[in-house]
Image (cartoon, rainbow, N blue to C red):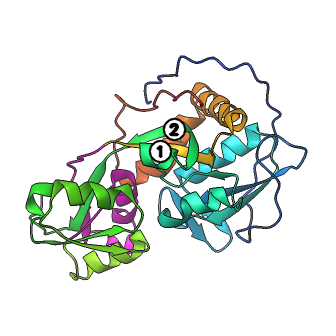
Amino acid sequence: MITRRIGAAAFTLVLAAGLAACGSDDGGDGGSGGGGDDSSIKIGIKFDQPGLGLKEGNTYTGFDVDVANYVAKELGKTDVQFIQAPSKQREDLIATGQVDLIFATYSITDERKEKVSFAGPYFIAGQDLLVASDSTIKGPKDLDGKKLCSVTGSTSADNVKAEVPGVNLQEFDTYSKCAEAVSKGQLDALTTDDTILAGYAAQEQYKGKLKVVGAPFSEERYGVGLKKGDTELCEQVNEALTKMVEDGEWDKAVEANFGPAGFKVDSATNPPELDPCS
């Protein structure tokens, strides 16, 4: 069981509870997630991250999905519409109202906070490397001159550029394409959060072919993206996240999604303390 560390801020808002549903990805005309009369909510997730946000047919699975459904329930939303949120499109999806919230391994950064607001964080991960099972790469220091893959618009790409100036960085639009290229020997490594990498390493087609190096070199604080300045919604989401930890559902989601991959969650930082809404 993960040791719980609840943020000190107390919340007094009583939220209506509803049944969460895995909705469609067609966008629809769902109303605001800010507590209006509309029972629908549009939530951005990743569609190609096993263990976090994965769409298979009309089914959505992963830790981000479980947290999103829990929060939606606490907000009284009975119609959850999941919409694909690629890394480079997340700010635009929020700004244009195409989504109300984003749960998509969305690291909280000062640069992003200039455009959107964040609730949370609800998880803290670390950036790592995914390599072939017989690779000799043991960390960033071994990447000089190597072909490394990351995703356009992610903090991972920026981190590596600063860490290893001599790396041959190639940016794709999805991590799935990166993982496939590494498995075929076309690239030497994929870098992103260890949670994401563990999900790929656990996939059937990559078992025995890919491995996570296990030497994280950053701290990624997953936040819930929402419209900039919407303090009321931020506080509602934080209230729901606090309750999820208190009632044990956060632990259950961690075990269900990361346990099968053998991923060990850092209990010193998780579950994280929540940032104040502003």
Instruction: Say whether residue 227 is left or right of residue 50.
Output: right
**Quadrant of the image containing the N terminus:** top left
Instruction: Say whether residue 10 is left or right of residue 15.
Output: left
The disc label shown at residue 262, or none: none
Is residue 258 visible in the rendered image? The answer is: yes
The three-letter amino acid code for the residue at tag 2 is Tyr
Residue 193 in magenta stretch: yes
Q: Which residues are magenta?
A: 189-218
Figure check: 3 above or below 30: above
**Seen from this angle, which residue lies furthest right?**
37
Residue in the image at 83% along x and 64% along y: 29
Q: Which residue is mark 1?
A: 222
Residue 127 in magenta stretch: no
**Quadrant of the image containing the C terminus:** top right
Give how far across and how far down residue 107 sits, in percent.
44, 48
Residue 134: quarter of image: bottom left
Considering the numbered disc 2 on the image, is that residue within a helix, a strand or a loop?
strand
Q: Are marks 2 and 1 in contact (CB under 8 Å)?
A: yes
How dense is the environment of label 1, judged by Cα within 10 Å: few (below 14), some, or many (20 and up)?
Answer: many
Give how far across and how far down residue 79 sits, in percent.
81, 55
How dense is the environment of label 2, judged by Cα within 10 Å: few (below 14), some, or many (20 and up)?
Answer: many
Q: Nearer the viewer, residue 169 or 267?
A: 169
Q: Label 2, label 1: how many angstroms apart (C-alpha)? A: 6 Å
The three-letter amino acid code for the residue at tag 1 is Tyr
Residue in the image at 57% along x and 64% along y: 85
Residue in the image at 57% along x and 29% along y: 245
Q: Which residue is mark 2?
A: 122
Give how far across and how far down residue 53 sits, in percent.
54, 59
Considering the numbered disc 1 on the image, is that residue within a helix, a strand or a loop?
strand
